[in-house]
Amino acid sequence: MIRRGEFDVIAQSLAPLSDTPRGLGLTDDAALYVPTAGRTAVLSTDTLVAGVHFLPDDPSGDIARKALRVNLSDIAAMGAAPLGYLLNLALPDTATDAWLDGFVAGLAADQETYKITLFGGDTVRTPGPLTVSVTAIGEVRIGRALKRGGAQVGDRIYVTGTIGDAAAGLRLLTDPSDVSDVNAEFLCTRYRRPQPRVAVGPRLVGLATAAIDISDGLVADLDHICETSAVAATVRAADVPLSGALRAAIAGHVLSLPDVLTGGDDYELLFCAPPTAHDALIALGAELDVPVTPIGEITSGRDVTVIDENGTPVALSRAGHTHF
Amino acid sequence: MIRRGEFDVIAQSLAPLSDTPRGLGLTDDAALYVPTAGRTAVLSTDTLVAGVHFLPDDPSGDIARKALRVNLSDIAAMGAAPLGYLLNLALPDTATDAWLDGFVAGLAADQETYKITLFGGDTVRTPGPLTVSVTAIGEVRIGRALKRGGAQVGDRIYVTGTIGDAAAGLRLLTDPSDVSDVNAEFLCTRYRRPQPRVAVGPRLVGLATAAIDISDGLVADLDHICETSAVAATVRAADVPLSGALRAAIAGHVLSLPDVLTGGDDYELLFCAPPTAHDALIALGAELDVPVTPIGEITSGRDVTVIDENGTPVALSRAGHTHF
């Protein structure tokens, strides 16, 4: 239990993270923020609940990072660059000062990594599970934000990085008997510490027609694009990029290909772009050292279809991984 | 239990509240917002937990309004006008569709009252108590925001409205045996449905040197101003404006004067201004039909002292009402 009062927690633990003048040293009722001239503010917010969105025993620094990064991923999916965040922290009595120190250290490390600062927030106690909401603030040139609704028939569908690692990591963490080889640590880290594609997102402006980050699962998030853009999509399962660790996990029956296609929490970018942008996208991936892989095409209609190497639709038991 | 999935809840219940184009119909990863030219964005966020910040059995529409209004109060205390908000809603399984309908109706009514719209948010399930975070977005002219740190020795201290009603309402709601007269409903409504001073706040720009809203209690919030401004304050207890209902509650021993001075949740404005601003402030209160009452003076030093009619310090058992 943290025996300090709210104001001491803010002054001692959180104020050192704050931005001046925006956060006003966390001594005021609100933060002040003027976007850069010619840019729009991009506001993303996500709530993470212990036992629902992360494992209650996860290291507190990882929980802090995940709460930040899932929002930085949303900012990147809009083609925006992050600036800062607001933090709403509902602490159970079981949280200790050491736990909070680890949480703050996780925030501090990611502030350094992503060049962001704390604008403000609220800290309360809860009789329930730890609940963390982060509201990330980013910027993109006015009128240039990437949206879900811009996909066009004939566009190619791309993903960054590799898909399915986080789903495998979650499976391993919740059923430790499956932790059978050296790949497990890689997969668990992919679940616990997602890598938002903050460098890629802003560079997709002018190239991509639509973008989203993969939080609910490849198929479910592609479905969000199709619904908003009023198009259909075909994904070639064999082209979906998989890590070596994930291939080993599939071979070891930790999870199946449909689990990969519907598992959540990868926080890679999924985007659409016309064929004319292909060379620029591949060059961009090479420049940023992030794999950028075409996995299918946008077609007319409304459904998402995944086909195998013979063109046969792959059966999926569920559309996606819901956090609700 | 709400049997609809997250996306149906968003599309059916929340999207009708959303702003276009800022909220993008709640179909994207983030909201887009460009402040009015010459104005700074003001971002306030507060988390309310059932059983901590409101009573679990409070009507869901009142919970929604309170979550909004405590933030609109913060926006007003900065001298800013509200524009919209983000909503983070962690729903327990006990929440029903009827409960959510009432919550959404409360938001809709307040959106109309305060001319604000929903920019975005996140809806999740929780095994714990209902947890609501609202991030309000407002605007004020660049460089003109009211802050806590501007109070000057010689300033007068003012409050809007009446003080202590919400503390009495909370007392009555948690100990129903005290509900003994017709004033109870007024006091309980003051607790459940605070009236943020959105009309007054922006008009204090250019008149007040420092401002805060009274959420932690008159003495505690004045102490925040004193700490940030590096000044002391003397409050004349006899000048603190009390409603007729509260006077009856004090006479009926529902609560004492120290309870009034330290009770929270009034969401009135507490501000400092030089004597030269007095006539303008009184005229402003008359114009807006909101009582504006001088209750003391800023002095040199650091402490908050409350004195009775003989100049004797009033003993306070605690500084304020903490929500932590």
Image (tube, coloured by chain):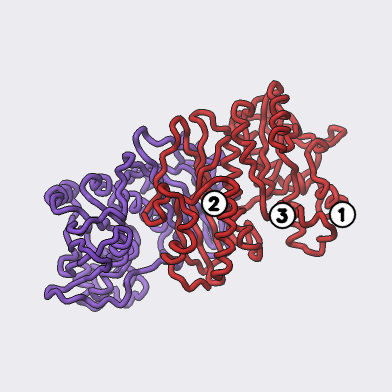
Chain colours: A purple, B red
From this viewpoint, is residue B238 visible?
A: yes
Q: Nearer the viewer, mark 3 or mark 2?
A: 3
Pointer 2 chain: A
Q: Position of residue A312 (x, y in %)?
A: 16, 76
Q: Quadrant of residue A228?
A: bottom left
- Quickly name the residue at label 1: B252
Say which amino acid is labelled 3. Answer: Thr
- x%, y% of residue B301? 68, 29
Look at mark 2 in the image and give the residue it sits on: A123
Q: Secondary structure at mark 1?
A: loop
The residue type indicated by label 2 comes to Thr
Image depth: mark 1 or mark 3 in front: 3
**Residue B185 placement, left or right of A140:** right
Tell me how far mark 1 sits from mark 3, CA to CA.
19 Å
User: Can marks 3 and 2 be said to lie on one chain?
Assistant: no
Q: CA distance from mark 2 to mark 1?
A: 35 Å
